[in-house]
Amino acid sequence: MPTSCRTSPLFFDALLVAALALAQVAVPPLKARVTDLTGTLNAQQQQALEHTLAEFEARKGSQIAVLLVPTTKPEAAVEYGVRVFDAWKLGRKGVDDGVLLLVAKEDRRVQIITGRGVEGVLPDAIVKRIVEEDITPRFKQGDFYGGVRAGADRMMRLIEGEALPPPHTQRAPVDSNLIFFAFIAVLFLGGILRAIFGRALAAAAVGGIIGVAAWLILGSLLFGVMAGVFAFLFTLISGGSSGWSSGGGGWSSGGGGFSSGGGGGFSGGGGGTAGGGAGGSW
């Protein structure tokens, strides 16, 4: 019995910790730069803000995300904000130039979390001024979109002046159907031009046409050269001297098209945070 009495407080402490963990507000999945779980922003406002933040990221590289939740309780807004920031991995890996603007509407609390890479231009004192001068005065008037927009705009202006690595431009994946039809074009052009100009001149012409087209479409000189060389060699060694034949039987696209594989979603870049930032109430 004495042993049971001594261990019971530990048992209840464990239950309390588990209950608090279960009571925490869940971190929503990151699907867009603007996530409104309160229904405060209308579709047009969300779209406008999303476009502005996406354009800024493409130009500067830094990621700014906005999250509106009803409440963060039992956690403080700063604790929940850091948890969201870490889960979303805002900012670029190794640069850590992400920013989270969190609004807990029912708590009447706003919190900005900054990554290490922007703490030089967005120190806690400056972030505090942004909250007090740009965001909360508009929130007090019921203008939540105006407050979020003003805060985001001021942070973007400040980050613009920071010397950060240029954004990494990711080239869109090549459509598999485009590759297939390019192959058909090589066969078709090669067959016709071989019959008119002969094998060598036809190969040179097809190689040049395909190479330039690939360069313009893909935006890469290397891919253009590779495509041109392939088209030249293929035209040179394929077919007979009497012209081109389809070979019978027709063709099939082999699968009915392609998928973009993601639906244009948004994800964090692998950044981290030192827990910098500031908050305020209205």
Image (cartoon, grey):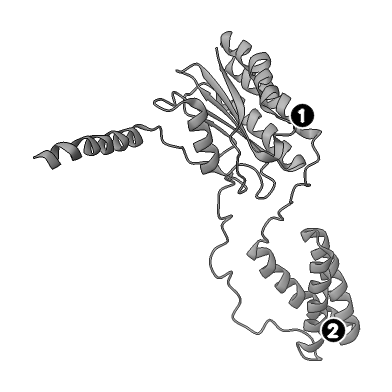
Task: Give SS at disc 2.
Answer: helix
The answer to whether residue 19 is visible is: yes
Of residues 19 and 144, the one nearer the viewer is 19
Crowding at dot 2, Cα within 10 Å, few <14 / some 14-19 / many 20+, comes out as some
Q: Residue at x 77, y 91 (%)?
A: 240
N-terminal-most mark, 1 or 2: 1
Mark 1 vs mark 2, foreground winner is 1
Q: Residue at x 60, y 49 (%)?
A: 270
For label 1, the residue is 158
**Horizontal and vertical percent position of residue 15:** 25, 36
Which residue sits furthest top? 141
* C-beta proximity under 8 Å, tags 1 and 2: no
* Identity, as a three-letter code, of the amino acid under mark 2: Ala
* Quadrant of the snapshot with the N terminus: top left
**Horizontal and vertical percent position of residue 155:** 71, 28
Picture layout, residue 64 above or below residue 226: above
Where residue 202 sits, quadrant-wise, is bottom right
Which residue sits furthest front? 2
Picture layout, residue 278 above or below residue 269: above
* Identity, as a three-letter code, of the amino acid under mark 1: Leu
Distance from disc 1 to disc 2, alpha carbons, whole Å, reads 64 Å
* Quadrant of the snapshot with the C terminus: top right
For label 2, the residue is 195
**Horizontal and vertical percent position of residue 18:** 30, 38
Crowding at dot 1, Cα within 10 Å, few <14 / some 14-19 / many 20+, comes out as few
Q: Residue at x 58, y 72 (%)?
A: 252
The answer to whether residue 198 is visible is: no
